[in-house]
Every structure is written in structure tokens, then in C-alpha cells.
Image (cartoon, rainbow, N blue to C red):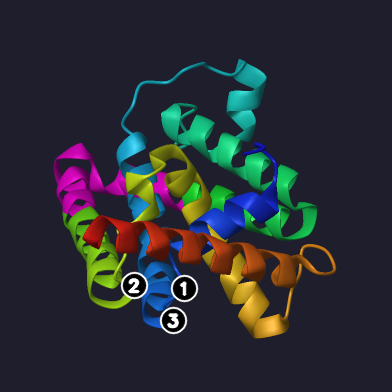
């Protein structure tokens, strides 16, 4: 799978999220999972310290640590996949980092990890219920953890953009992805049928 092949990524993820209720559950829970992960990552040690000039320009709550590195990586990756939608999702990711930094700083680690734990449990349980009760298929993360965690936030925003305003990354994108999703689901069902026989 090409690293920047949006069609393949979206089709892979979409094949695990074809049920509308499961998609709605993911739209509800994916971003809170990312947001609360950034709250927890706020407490990782700084990877680098900017110069004093830069420090004077930014708010002291911002720490250039793993949360910042993940934010930059996600934002750049999304923009590389699709310059318009990806830049928008990258901007949302950056806003999550900014707001999670303020929340983490005000909560402190003692309370933050408890809030994060509860939010993560609710989010993951919701997603597994979506897959078990509605999709009837194991989550994508069981087949490709890194790809599922990386694409989840982008997938739900792209799904919302497609259904609300008809956004396409390029002409024919939705048609191509739909065909790939249907082929992937058929292949999976055929494998399941062979296991049962």
C-alpha cells in the first residue's frame, strides 16, 4: 500500500466501516480519543527546547514533546494525502493539540490521567460495540494497527465532508473507493465462508 495513496487508505478503512451506525459511532468517538491521547502526551518530557526568542513569542503552556511531534506528523501526513481536506484536518489536529495542552496544564497529571482513562475506555468500548453489534466485523486496527490509528481521524472528517457537501479529493474518488470497498468486503466474506465450510 503506497504511503500517500489516499484511495487505498480510505478503501481499507472504509471496508471496516460500511454500516452507517458504526460510521456514526466512529464520528462520535474517534476525535475524542485523539484529543484525550494528546492530553496524556502533554506530560511527556520535551524533545527540544526552542530558542529564548521563540519562547518569548509562544504561551508557556506549549511543550514541544511527543504530543507536538504526533500533531505535526499527523497534520503533514493528512495534507500530503489531500491538500484541501488534509490541510483542514491537519488544522483541526493542531487545534486539538493547542486546546489539549491548555486542558492538561490546568488539570495537572493527577486528574488528567483519570479523565483520559475514562474517556479512552468509553471511546474504545463504543467503537468495539459499533463493530460487534452493527458492522459484524473486527476493527481495522486488528489487521493494521498503525494504519487504523493514523487514518481514523482523517477518515471520519472525510466521511462527513463527502456526505454533507459532496466533497471529493479528485473526480471519481468516491466511485473508485466504493468499488474497492465492495471488493474488499466481498473478499472478506468469501474468506469467512471458507472458514465455516
Q: Which residue is mark 3?
A: 20
Earlier residue among tags 1 and 2: 1
Q: Position of residue 192 (x, y in %)?
A: 32, 60
The residue located at (35%, 65%) in the rendering is: 29
Residue 175: name its quadrant: bottom right
Q: Residue 44: within the magenta?
A: no
Q: Is residue 90 visible?
A: no
CB under 8 Å between discs 1 and 2: yes
Observer able to see residue 175: yes
Q: Which residues are magenta?
A: 99-117
Q: CA distance from mark 1 to mark 3?
A: 6 Å
Q: Which residue is mark 1?
A: 18
Ranked by sequence position, the earlier of labels 3 and 2 is: 3
The residue under label 2 is: 135
Using the image as rendered, state which of residue 4 and residue 41 is in the foreground: 4
- For mark 3, does the 10 Å Cα neighbourhood hold few (<14), some (14 to 19), or many (20 or more) residues? few
Above/below status of 56 relative to 14: above
The alpha-carbon separation of the residues under discs 3 and 2 comes to 9 Å
Residue 90 vs residue 139, the one in the foreground:
139
Whether the residues at callouts 1 and 3 have beta carbons within 8 Å, the answer is: no
At label 2, counting other C-alpha atoms closer than 10 Å, the crowd grade (few under 14, some 14-19, many 20 or more) is many
Q: Secondary structure at mark 1?
A: loop
Is 184 rendered above or below residue 50? below
> Which of the 4 image quarters holds residue 138?
bottom left
Element class at badge 2: helix
- Comparing 114 with 110, the one in front is 114
Amino acid at each position: 500500500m503506497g504511503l500517500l495513496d489516499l484511495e487505498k487508505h480510505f478503501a481499507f478503512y472504509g471496508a471496516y466501516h460500511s454500516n452507517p451506525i458504526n460510521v456514526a459511532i466512529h464520528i462520535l468517538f474517534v476525535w475524542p480519543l485523539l484529543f484525550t491521547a494528546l492530553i496524556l502526551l502533554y506530560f511527556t518530557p520535551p524533545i527540544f527546547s526552542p530558542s529564548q526568542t521563540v519562547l518569548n513569542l509562544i504561551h508557556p503552556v506549549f511543550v514541544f514533546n511527543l504530543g507536538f511531534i504526533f500533531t505535526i506528523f499527523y497534520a503533514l501526513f493528512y495534507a500530503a494525502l489531500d491538500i484541501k481536506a488534509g490541510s483542514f484536518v491537519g488544522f483541526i489536529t493542531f487545534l486539538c493539540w493547542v486546546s489539549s495542552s491548555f486542558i492538561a496544564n490546568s488539570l495537572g497529571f493527577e486528574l488528567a490521567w483519570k479523565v483520559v482513562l475514562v474517556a479512552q475506555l468509553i471511546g474504545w468500548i463504543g467503537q468495539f460495540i459499533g463493530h460487534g453489534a452493527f458492522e459484524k466485523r473486527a476493527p481495522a486496527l486488528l489487521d493494521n494497527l498503525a494504519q487504523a490509528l493514523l487514518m481514523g481521524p482523517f477518515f471520519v472528517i472525510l466521511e462527513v465532508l463527502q456526505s454533507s457537501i459532496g466533497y471529493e479529493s479528485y473526480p471519481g474518488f468516491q466511485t473508485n473507493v466504493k468499488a474497492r470497498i465492495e471488493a474488499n468486503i466481498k473478499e472478506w466474506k468469501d474468506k469467512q465462508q471458507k472458514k465455516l465450510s
